[in-house]
Image: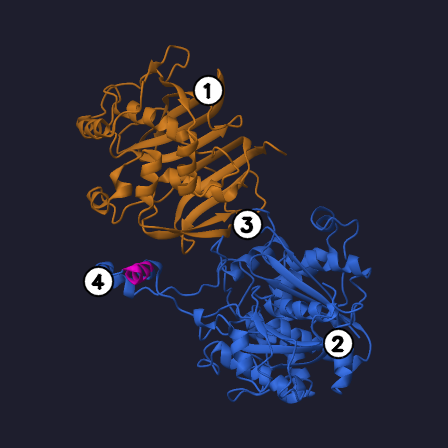
Chain colours: A orange, B blue
Amino acid sequence: MTDWQIAPRVMTGPPEGGAVLRGAIASLRKRGITGDLDPVALLRPGVMLDAARIHAYAQVCGFGERGGVPLTYPHLLAFPLHMAALLAPSFPFPAIGLVHLENTIVQHAKLDSGDRLDVMAGFGAWITHEKGQAFTVESRIARAGQIVWESASLYLRLGVDAPKGAPYQGLPADELPLATIRRFDLPANLGRRYARVSGDSNPIHTSAIAARMFGFPRPIAHGMWTKAHALAQLLPDEPIEHAEVRVAFKTPAFLPGGACLMVAPDSSPLVFELRDRREQKPHLRGLLKDVRYVDR
Amino acid sequence: MLTANSLRRVAIIGGCRIPFARANTAYAEASNQDMLTAALQGLVDRHKLHGERLGEVVAGAVLKHSRDFNLTRESVLSTTLDHATPAYDVQQACGTGLEAALLVANKIALGQIEVGIAGGVDTTSDAPIAINERLRKVLMKANRGKTTGQKLAALAAIRPRMLMKPELPRNSEPRTKLSMGEHCELMAKRWNIARAAQDELACASHRNLAATYARGFFTDLMVPFRGLTRDNNLRPDLSMEKLAALKPAFDKHGGTLTAGNSTPLTDGAAVVLLATEDWARAHNLPILAYLRAGETAAVDFVNGDEGLLMAPAYAVPRLLEKLGIMLQDFDFYEIHEAFAAQVLCTLAAWEDAGYARDRLKLDTPPGPIDRTKLNVAGSSLGTGHPFAATGGRILATLAKLLAEKGKGRGLISICAAGGQGVVAVVER
């Protein structure tokens, strides 16, 4: 588990694409028998919130102009650190084949483009999952020493016998009646468009051939896009002071395709799901709470 | 813009519509222009307007072919009106017909014209189907090519797939991609509108419409068209049992809206003749009623946490305040039945003190209405709902109801796509 008190390892820039690919392939040799999670955090100091990149991201995810920095955007700043952590020689599993189970984001203050942020990431705890070994990668983003944004991504390595850690606690699955509030198309080029703005160029999202190589009949939408798009629909187009959103990724959404956004009306925290066009297969289930706006 | 010495009252002289037909039935081969022309000619015949130059004819259609850019003017040219009668098209989704009437009425009131016709038409059977966007772009590029070589090079980008995917008009909101039924289902859930209450309203609509046909009320408000003499959606023998047997149409699990308590896609046209009292007198035409006032409203259904079809709930109290009257000061309420649930949500909203305070910004809610005065001659659940034609149908029906009664006041409320609403007050 990361010790946030000890000096982090500083990353000067995001890892270059070719290196990520080579590292990912090399990591396939890992067996995951031994090893503990590296306690040293990774740090990207003084990353600027770039207005042009935010705009491009907002366009692809469906966020409006007035809301400023989308709640999910800082994830992109931490994502290179996630990759670096998962590709590090000391990490026991191959990066390829990890299943992204959950992502939780808590924002503590309004963010503005131009802000200089210190972005840190490190491993959280081992978690015992019925299908293998789960663990979290945590991100902490600070502005002038104050933590303004945090996230936890839960990943799963399938097929590990005798996993370590506390048992996995899924999202409460109470059967609230859900109502569809939006429908939308998932165009064929969605994976490529999101890859361009996010830097997450995992080929299962961008290429039909690669998707088939990894056992998917078609490319699948980025989980973080589905989360971002759901939030773009659920949150009004205004700057956010504080919000907390936890989602579980359920089943892949194939591209091209369609989806609908459902909510449990008047639920608190707000329960929402992204499902397929026929409102059957859930892609994403989430809880949104403690949303506070700047101007209210 | 006041062109006369003072404002003039706007008289409703008469109306004419063709019977409404469920989509892909009697009017499957009829175009918007065919139907609008038939309704206009029916009005001209009945009021002996042959060769008469009117101030203006205003109408519209929600689903329109690109060739119908001058739909109303082209229809006027197919009638026996003086072809020197100007015309223009309007479009405000299901509010089109009533909005057209307000536009004509305003010009009459201000003295810009003496007489005009307002109405609307719609067909979902002869709907515009466009080529898909990618093929359209290729063809436009080929069209811009200056040489044959450039044109052919552009056309080489055509793929067989493009030819197989026409772009169909969709009955869904562009911003949410939800159908109107799905939106109304959300409203029904918000206001806890029971299935049985919706079915009862549907039953009453068919029952009232059948009774109104039976007493010959519609004879001078309609003209037969393509073998129909009355709306073919009407089911005089409709029962609560039959309605109860229908499955939810929009939300299969736990939904309350069905094909029975929602309007079907419908083809039809309706127009209304409006004029000054002097014009009516000079032409020896009796006045049915007066169009007193109109109001439009819109709600932010995208981000505003408000139902798509709730705008009339806002428009009516605003208009009442301007006129200094109460919601209870009416003899007839004509609330367009897009869905039974829409009517019931609106009525529930007007009785809700919290809603009145938080949303309508009123100290006291508008309150309940006498339900025996609601849609007494049947409404859209019975007749069907050719989007732009509904305003003309309701306005003519209400004017004649008031003429029959001799004296009174009626309210019209019509919800429309895009979170809009058009309402009006008619008096005699």
State if disc 2 and disc 4 touch (CB < 8 Å).
Answer: no
Circle 2: residue type: Thr
The nearer-to-camera label among 1 and 2 is: 2
Circles 1 and 2 on the same chain: no
> Which mark, by number, is residue B276?
2
Alpha-carbon span between mark 1 and mark 2: 72 Å
Q: Which residue is mark 4?
A: B152
Task: Tell which subunit mark 4 falls on.
Answer: B
In the depicted view, which residue is nearer to us: A30 or B390? B390
CA neighbours of label 2 inside 10 A, class few (<14), some (14 to 19), many (20+): many
Q: Which residue is mark 3?
A: B302
State if disc 2 and disc 1 touch (CB < 8 Å).
Answer: no
x and y percentages locating residue B143 in the rendered image:
30, 63
User: Which tag, 3 or 4, sits closer to the chain's start?
Assistant: 4
Question: Does residue B138 appear to the left or right of B353 in the view shown?
Answer: left
Q: Secondary structure at mark 4?
A: helix
Q: Which residues are magenta?
A: B137-145
x and y percentages locating residue B158 in the rendered image:
25, 61
Alpha-carbon span between mark 4 and mark 1: 58 Å
State if disc 3 and disc 1 touch (CB < 8 Å).
Answer: no
Q: Quadrant of the N terminus of chain A?
A: top left
In the depicted view, which residue is nearer to us: B34 or B308? B34
Q: Going 58% across and 69% down the picture, which residue do you hit?
A: B261
User: Which tag, 3 or 2, sits closer to the chain's start?
Assistant: 2
CA neighbours of label 4 inside 10 A, class few (<14), some (14 to 19), many (20+): few
Alpha-carbon span between mark 1 and mark 3: 34 Å
The answer to whether residue B15 of the structure is visible from this angle is yes
Question: Does residue B346 appear to the left or right of A118 in the view shown?
Answer: right
Circle 3: residue type: Val
Q: Which residue is mark 1?
A: A142
Circles 3 and 2 on the same chain: yes
